[in-house]
Image (cartoon, rainbow, N blue to C red):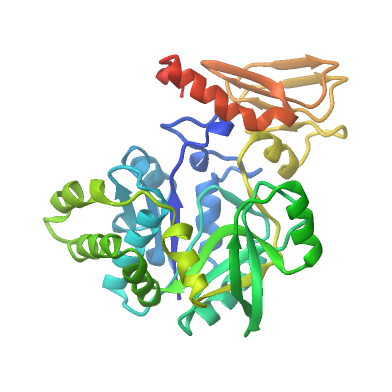
Amino acid sequence: MLHAVVPAGGSGTRLWPLSRAQRPKFLLPLTGTDSSLLQSTVERARLLSDPDHVYVVTGAAHAVDVARQLPEVPGDNILVEPSPRDSAAAISLAAAVIAERDPAAIMGAFAADHLVLDGEAFAKTVAKAMELASTGLLMTIGITPTGPDTGFGYLRLGPPVGPGYQLGAFVEKPDQVSAVEYVSAGNYLWNAGMFVWRVDAYLAELQRHRPALHDAVRTLAAAWDSNHREALFARLWPTLEKISIDYAVMEPAAAAGKVGVVPGDFEWHDVGDYNTLGQVLKANDKVGNVVVEPRGSAQTFLTESKRNVVVPAAGRLIATVGVDDLIIVDTPDALLVCPRDRAQEVKGLVEELKQANRTDLV
């Protein structure tokens, strides 16, 4: 059985003002259903895992909300980071805790803020990755590209291995010309940041490439059920290197031929901004307007308006006349209006608010 780990961090600044530091995007129902992104991720993992085999790694500010949204997940399986130290620390801590409980466990790591519409296809792909992970390979799941995209890193496939491939190399986010070349070549996948491995195999690679991080998380995991845990966290956690798991472990392991990849042919979205939401969610009318997370009495009248993404989160009426391709997000304390093709720039707006000391709004 899979031990499913869901890293739940980040504030989703490109989805401001709906997503805030205290209530980030993974806690929000942005799936086209009543489920939050986090709940949807755990629901997919449950196709391969029992509730007591599901873990969430999150920050102290979000631990209570995570527990409320996932009452079936044991409290001891919600691993709370005192401060964010990037994905290598978060995922390695989970691997170490699982290893204490089941040294030969197979673990999967799946981000809380990704949207996968076909849970069955996802589960079949993970099962293939588990098959190869049982041999000792560190596995990643790549997404078959639907077209050239400069927003994702890529995975270059090596020779076939069982139901997958050996990973040739991790490739950084490309320019447009390179992205076209990768997709045309047919042996590149999008890097979706999904991993599957035996915890003993992963921890051995962590010890080889990041020994200080390895020793710290193993020490924390050994004391997980003791009275010394909080004191150890206070002493060790701030010293951990801030580094992504790709740089810390996966890239050097791939260079040594120890990483495999399984292609995922399911629809996958990194819900990073409002334009993406407009592409993913079903339109509410025949002219492409998408209304996200309507609240109670909130209404929208979109007259002679097309392809807008509207979020009436304040509960009041939003009306438009003759406007197309806009993002309109209405919350009780902030209103955002911007063109859909500039959705990525919302992150910069949040930085401006921070510089203006408007931390009450971020």
Q: Position of residue 291 (x, y in %)?
A: 71, 31
Q: As displayed, is residue 135 above or below residue 236? A: below
Left or right, residue 281 beside residue 70: right
Q: As displayed, is residue 337 above or below residue 156? A: above
Instruction: Name the residue at the left extreme.
Output: 227
Q: Position of residue 72 (x, y in %)?
A: 40, 56
* Residue depicted at x 38% and y 72%: 205
Residue 76 versus residue 161: which sits nearer the camera?
Answer: 161
Q: Quadrant of the N terminus?
A: bottom left
Q: Does residue 295 appear in the picture of this structure?
A: no
Q: Position of residue 28 (x, y in %)?
A: 53, 38
User: Total marks drawn?
Assistant: 0
* Residue depicted at x 34% and y 53%: 78
Residue 199 versus residue 246: which sits nearer the camera?
Answer: 246
Q: Does residue 202 appear in the picture of this structure?
A: yes
* Residue depicted at x 51% and y 53%: 111
Residue 213 versus residue 308: which sits nearer the camera?
Answer: 213
Specify the quadrant of the image occupied by residue 312. Answer: top right
Specify the quadrant of the image occupied by residue 56. Answer: bottom left
Left or right, residue 102 beside residue 136: left
* Residue depicted at x 51% and y 58%: 110
Q: As displayed, is residue 331 above or below residue 71? A: above
Q: Position of residue 282 (x, y in %)?
A: 76, 42
Residue 56 versus residue 217: which sits nearer the camera?
Answer: 217
